Image (spheres, rainbow, N blue to C red):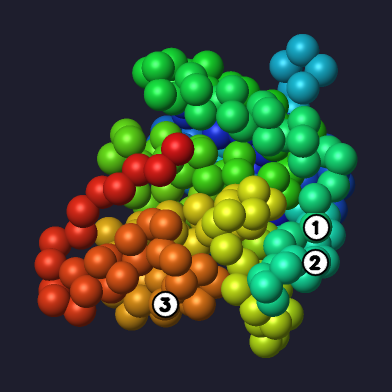
């Protein structure tokens, strides 16, 4: 079995990068839509060939996992703001990435989904740990009804953000600070998709934690928690 990081998912083909070798290859599979960029796939290769100087593979996916270390995620320090509030530190590259993700969000609002996905993939090619790129790919999957795939994107975004949190939060991380928004979006999307795939207990834990981060509740987490407790059918809420 070989392990590869998923770099881009397309129709019936995925661009991969070998965990050990670093070699880029293209994996051919009848159904790729359950997988997401940033995941690590264990593949039992049954055929390997070269075309135009590029390696191609076929075989079976034996397992999938998430390893944030392989995405080279550097934890972001929390900076104290006025009123005992906190925000993730902002780096210069964040301004560039945020502008590109905002452009992708505009494409989504205008119904240009392929253009949005292409732009988000380009962001991840440049920065594989960009939380908001995963968030918006999750949103695209959600709009297409691909909830298992959406869950995978939001999970990655959530785990990347969680890596920067201390074991005990020093204070709230409110939506009012732009640097907090990607992680708050990830927490909301992850909790909602957990509920939608039938995992109510983990969904409750994630959404309760979201309220701890920002009790102002910009995503309506309290309503979601009430609906989960009442056993209601999951509903959709898309936030671009």
Q: Are marks 2 and 3 in contact (CB under 8 Å)?
A: no
* Residue behind mark 3: 208
Name the image quarter holding residue 162.
bottom right
Q: Sort mark 1 into few (<14), some (14-19) or many (20+) by Cα contacts within 10 Å.
A: some
**The C terminus lies in quadrant:** top left
Which secondary structure, mark 2?
A: strand
Q: Are marks 1 and 2 in contact (CB under 8 Å)?
A: yes
In the depicted view, which residue is nearer to us: 227 or 122?
A: 227
Question: Residue 177 got which mark?
Answer: none
3D distance between C-alphas at marks 1 and 2: 6 Å
**The N terminus lies in quadrant:** bottom right
Name the image quarter holding residue 201.
bottom left
Of the two numbered discs 3 and 1 on the same chain, state the one appearing first in sequence: 1
* Residue behind mark 1: 89
In the depicted view, which residue is nearer to us: 229 or 47?
A: 229
Q: Position of residue 105 (x, y in %)?
A: 51, 29
* Residue behind mark 2: 79
Q: Is residue 200 rendered to the left or right of residue 149?
A: left
As drawn, the residue found furthest toward the top would be 52
Q: Is residue 134 rendered to the left or right of residue 127?
A: left
3D distance between C-alphas at marks 3 and 1: 24 Å
3D distance between C-alphas at marks 2 and 3: 23 Å
Q: Sort mark 3 into few (<14), some (14-19) or many (20+) by Cα contacts within 10 Å.
A: some
Q: Position of residue 156 (x, y in %)?
A: 59, 56
Depth check, mark 2 against mark 3: the one in front is: 2
Q: Is residue 129 visible?
A: yes
Of the two numbered discs 2 and 3 on the same chain, state the one appearing first in sequence: 2
Residue at image position (32%, 34%) is: 144
Residue at image position (77%, 31%) is: 96
Of the two numbered discs 1 and 2 on the same chain, state the one appearing first in sequence: 2
Which secondary structure, mark 3?
A: helix
As drawn, the residue found furthest toward the front would be 83
């Amino acid at each position: 079995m070989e392990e590869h990081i998923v770099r881009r998912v397309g129709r019936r083909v995925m661009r991969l990068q070998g965990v050990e070798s670093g070699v880029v290859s293209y994996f051919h599979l009848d159904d790729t839509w359950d997988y997401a960029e940033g995941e690590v796939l264990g593949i039992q290769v049954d055929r390997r060939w070269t075309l135009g100087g590029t390696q191609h593979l076929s075989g079976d996916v034996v397992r999938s996992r998430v390893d944030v270390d392989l995405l080279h995620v550097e934890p972001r320090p929390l900076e104290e703001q006025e009123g005992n509030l906190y925000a993730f530190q902002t780096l210069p590259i964040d301004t560039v990435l945020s502008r590109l993700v905002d452009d992708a969000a505009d494409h989504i609002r205008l119904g240009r989904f392929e253009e949005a996905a292409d732009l988000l993939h380009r962001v991840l090619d440049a920065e594989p740990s960009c939380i908001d790129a995963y968030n918006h790919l999750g949103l695209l999957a959600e709009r297409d009804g691909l909830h298992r795939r959406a869950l995978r994107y939001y999970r990655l975004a959530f785990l990347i953000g969680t890596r920067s949190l201390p074991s005990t939060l020093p204070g709230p991380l409110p939506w009012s600070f732009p640097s907090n928004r990607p992680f708050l979006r990830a927490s909301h999307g992850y909790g909602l998709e957990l509920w939608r795939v039938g995992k109510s207990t983990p969904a409750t834990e994630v959404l309760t934690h979201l309220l701890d981060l920002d009790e102002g509740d910009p995503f309506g987490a309290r309503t979601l928690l009430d609906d989960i407790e009442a056993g209601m059918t999951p509903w959709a809420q898309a936030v671009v």
